[in-house]
Image: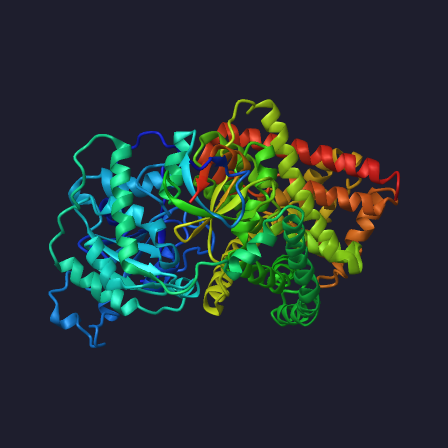
Amino acid sequence: MTSSMDLASAPLGTSLTLLGIEKVAHGRRLATLGLREGSTFRLLARTIGGGRIVLVAGSRIALGRDLVRQLRATAA
Amino acid sequence: MSEATRIRPPVTPAPTPPVSAKSCCQTTTQVSAGAQAPVVALVGAPNTGKSTLFNALTGSRVTTGNWPGTTVEVSRGAWRPTRLATTPAGDDCSGDLDLPAEAVTLLDLPGAHSLDAHSPDEQLTGGLLQDGPDDERPDLCIVTVDASRLAHGLYLVSQIRELPMRVVLAVTMTDVAVQRGLCLDPHLLSAALGCPVVLTDPRRRTGLATLASTVLTALVDPVPAPRQTLDTDDALVREDERFAWLSTAAEQATVVAGHDGLSVSDKVDRWVTAPVVGPLVFLSVMWAVFQVTTSVAAPLQDALDRLFSGPLTDTVAAILRLAHLNGTWVEGLLVNGLVAGVGMLLTFVPLMALMFVLLALLEDSGYLARAAVVTDRLMRAIGLPGRAFLPLVVGFGCNVPAISATRILPDARQRLLTVLLVPFTSCSARLTVFVMLGTTFFGRNAGTAVFGMYVASVVLVVLVGLLLRATLWRTMGAEPLIIDLPAYHVPTLRLTAAVVWQRLRGFLRTASGIIVVTVCAVWLLQSIPTTAGPSFAQVPVEDSVYGVVARTISPVFAPAGFNQWQTASALMVGFVAKEAVISSWAQTYAAEQPQPGQAGLLGDHIQRAFQQSSGGHTLPAVLAFMVFLLAYTPCVATLAAQRREVGLRWTAFGVAVQLTTAWLLAVTMFQVGRLFW
């Protein structure tokens, strides 16, 4: 069984699978951008303030620190 | 044909009656293609090229930019697809079709990721497409989708395909997709989605003819049956079904030709959004913009200034002498008023053009979205999301559209706070005064002085935001940063030129109207005597109504070191519009001269004024004046925009905050500064 981690502690450049998001309101917004439970993505960069740039379905999405800590993923 | 107007979206997400695309079009005849013309709506996720496509099809000039949220209102224009339509072989097919009409009314709707309303703009788009009666919806939807992130735009397509509506998919950014090793087959995508698919590049105007003929064909075809979906009330199950459908379509139609490694754009992003380096890049870029602007434009400004104050003034004076009007009020109005005031405005055209070019390059390149990421933490400190940076950036051009751009924010209180903060962003009209004072008092360091005012503007936004947040908006929750980063583009000459011309024309149109009206009003007030003796238009300025009002106000500025009545009068006029500050100064000093056209250098007069009013502490007084100018009410047009968005009470509150902040800062700046200079 592969262990899950939040995106703040996930390595850059590795393929990850999204496990879930605690706040559903944000989850729906992320889902329309392609970041939904079960989707595969990569972390491209750390941004100022502790955020991350995520590559998912061809889109580059910048996520803030709070959101990065809420999202959990596992190695794909 | 090339005209476009805007329909305002509802300001709050409260329930509103469904918007009707057709009834909207029938209310403004000069821009729609007529009441009977078909209505075609352009929709799509933010930053997929809708507005660029709209401009390419209608010849309009709505605002475009390579960052999300550029379209915050609905634009409408007439499009004549029969002029573009071709068969696949390139022949004109318009004669072979039973065309619905020669022209169609084209709507450019705000960007939306889905038909679910997350902000007033998305609510407007969703309302137009799904909540209105069937016979009042657009006859066809062109959905723009970015080829480089196909799945990203298809969620909206999946929702629109569930409606009884004709849909044509316009796939843009194919060049970016190719760079990323993605190859798209439009025929496979069309088969999977059940609607026509056209590849187009609105920035380079390719694929427009195919799009036109496809739309014409679709308009005469019957409305296709809505896509069959699961019969369930569970929103999550329905979303799952949509994602499965769109993922299948995207996978079938896309071939990954190259490896999906880090692109150049990704490598650049690693640096420009990184801690430490990101803010340094941001500050360097902004400093370079102001340094280049002031240093390159300065010689051109000087040349124009010499032209207006020399040969042009002499020519007008000579013509008036020939007409025996020298020494009359006509000469005073024309030479001291219009030539001095309008001439001073025109000397700033090279500066504004250069500034607009640089900002257009930044926008079109895609950097501004990264700047929003860099400033997110700063924005978050005052309870605003990173997205609030975008309207604030617009405010650095002009505060009026920036107030409208706050509609991209989903939360009503965040919008209100942003509306109150926008006036503290230093608009281009204030730039003209900063540059003049910078070159007059700071010489070679003028660029740095002007840049300093922009830094002060950002600091002011943060400080006032913190103050309001700590007092009035304590309970406001924070919105997480979620921002879609567009691909970097090499800016195109056509788009850059179009954006620059649009803004420069807007500046000149607004400024020239305001200048002429203000110059006439100032001249009139300067001509009315307040004492017995002098006749109309023969009164010394300080004894005119204008001078007396300015002298009454001026003591208020004594603690800030700029209580000369001429300086106070410039601020008085600046309340109406900052574009008029320099012209009114020029007018006041020109009118004080015994001979029209002998005003001397405006800078000399202003230097003397500040020197006298500050008791020799000239630089602190000038800086205090610049800070006051930065912080007090931008113009009446901004007040009108604020009143439209947040009502009279909050607008009045904003004015009180601006005037109080401006005065306190100016006094502090002078009183502290005089200890050192």
Q: Which residue is located at x 30 percent, y 67 percent?
A: B208
Where does the C terminus of chain B fall, quadrant-wise? top right
Residue B445 x %, y %:
78, 57
**Residue B353 location, quadrant:** bottom right
Question: On the rendered structure, is B451 left or right of B644?
Answer: right
Q: Provide residue B545's location: percent of width, then percent of height.
A: 66, 41
> Which residue is more in the foreground, B647 or B55?
B55
| Residue B98 sits above or below residue B375 on the image | below
Q: Name the residue rendered at 19%, 32% in the picture.
A: B232
Q: Give B207 or B357, whichever is nearer the viewer.
A: B207
Q: Residue at x 58, y 53 (%)?
A: B270
Figure check: B506 above or below B387: below
Quadrant housing the N terminus of chain B: bottom left
As drawn, B35 above or below B532: below
In the rendered image, residue B412, in percent from the top left (x then y), is placed at 45, 31
Q: Would you say residue B146 is visible in this rendering?
A: yes
Left or right: where does residue B165 sit relative to residue A11?
Answer: left
Visible residue check, residue B101:
no
Q: Quadrant of residue B470?
A: top right
The one nearer the camera, A9 or B159, is A9
How many numbered discs, if any?
0
Whether residue A71 sits left or right of residue B159 in the image: it is right
- Up-down: is B351 above or below B437? below
The answer to which image quadrant residue B305 occupies is: bottom right
Residue B638 place in picture, x, y as percent? 52, 42
Q: Nearer the viewer, residue B523 or B235?
A: B235
B38 horizontally vs B471: left or right: left
